[in-house]
Amino acid sequence: MSRVVIIGAGQAGASLAARLRSKGFDGSITMIGAEPAPPYQRPPLSKKYLLGEMALERLFLRPENFYADQNIDLRVNASVTAIDPTNKTVSVGGESLPYDMLALTTGSAPRRLPAAIGGTLPGVYTMRDLADADALAPHMAAGKKLLIVGGGYIGLEAAAVAASRGLEVTLVEAAPRILQRVAAPETADYFRELHQSRGVTLIEGTGLERLLGETHVTGARLADGREIACDLAIVGIGITPETALAEVAGLALENGIQTNAQCQTSDPAIWAAGDCASFPWQGGRLRLESVPNAIDMAECVADNMLGEAREYHAKPWFWSDQYDVKLQIAGLNAGYDRTILRPGDKPGTQSVWYYKGETLLAVDAMNDARAYMIGKRLVEAGKSPAPETVADPATDLKSLV
């Protein structure tokens, strides 16, 4: 009987285990997670859960009894300390656990500020997992001063929740503008105006010199000498793939754990999926940090463990919820040289269409579900309507598909 071990009990790990069982795999499945909770959704952590609008049980991807019912040995609060690819074992809790096939769904970890500039002061938080949300929640009280370091989606989502809770929010971004790395100026302009209308102070183009305080964070000194007082700080400066186990096991790394088109690592008995894994993409390599990718890649791993030899073809899409705005993103905008800003049918709605030459790469849609759905279908089909056609307000988007 085949033995599958999954290291990582997040979205990818849970999707992989469920897929194996749904397709009739009757071997043993052991899933090992470092956190005390069963697999849960991460996106609501920094939104509804932090706002107190979602109970813990509603975060869970499956009812707690699902794993026992499916004969999945879910081990929570457990850490794998080593992988031995030669003997096909993993070390966990003093036990040497054998496997025939191993999956790494280890996810990613938030980048932190160095201790030398106050990054480890009490009152400084990251927003990545359940423990982070639980630690932060009691301090999200109206009237408190919150400093957010980082103007990407993590920082902006945290700002939206905090401002909604009545905190006094200041967000600092070292790059010339918010969303510099991930979105066009038009999208950044939309969200800048949105946050400022809710009372958030945005400081762009100014780096953080250090956080201030001795026994607790009390403020920050910026690169231009300004000092800002705060009661707490959230650091949202990106994430890094969890590759330590893979590295010690001798697996090839390249922007995460390197996989081939079938999601296999450099060891044919070991697969990888989700935030931690990079895969072949348009002549290069790509690592995607998104829930859809975690699910789709994990299901591809499950299929290939069952012998299907299926190649993984990513269909990138993402979302971000801020206040009452849902941003939906289809495609990847890397390399764009032109954008089209298209107003939506209702006030406060719009879409940004990214082109490289005449090729449509991606679409950002703000409260514009129609633009998102049509843009997604076009990108995934490799179809590119002329930029002039998209820019024309008289064009019915439905006619483009």
Image (cartoon, rainbow, N blue to C red):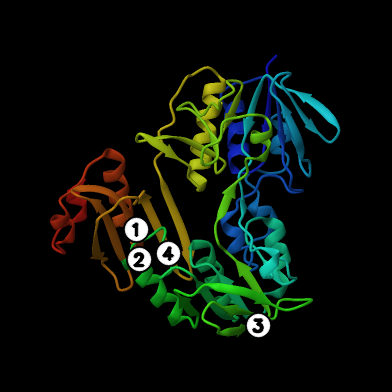
Q: State how far apart marks 4 and 1 are (Cα).
A: 12 Å
Q: Who comes first in sequence, dot 4 or dot 2?
A: 4
> Looking at the image, is 47 positioned above or below residue 167?
above
Q: Residue at x 64, y 73 (%)?
A: 233
Q: Contact (CB < 8 A) between labels 4 and 2?
A: yes
> Looking at the image, is 331 positioned above or below residue 161?
above
Looking at the rendered structure, the kind of residue marked 4 is Leu
Q: Residue at x 76, y 42 (%)?
A: 76
Q: Closest to the observer: 38 or 387? A: 387
Q: State how far apart marks 3 and 4 are (Cα).
A: 25 Å
Q: Which residue is mark 1?
A: 364
Q: State how far apart marks 1 and 2 are (Cα).
A: 7 Å
Q: Which residue is mark 4?
A: 179
Q: Is residue 367 left or right of residue 360?
A: right
Q: Which residue is mark 3?
A: 144
Looking at the rendered structure, the kind of residue marked 3 is Lys
Q: Closest to the observer: 123 or 200? A: 123
Q: Quadrant of residue 301?
A: top right
Q: Who comes first in sequence, dot 1 or dot 3?
A: 3
Q: Label 4 neighbourhood size at 10 Å, few (<14), some (14-19), many (20+)?
A: many
Looking at the rendered structure, the kind of residue marked 2 is Thr
Q: Is residue 91 left or right of residue 86?
A: right
Q: Who comes first in sequence, dot 1 or dot 2?
A: 2
Residue sitting farthest toward the right: 94
Task: Tell me the number on the disc at residue 187.
Answer: 2
Looking at the rendered structure, the kind of residue marked 1 is Asp
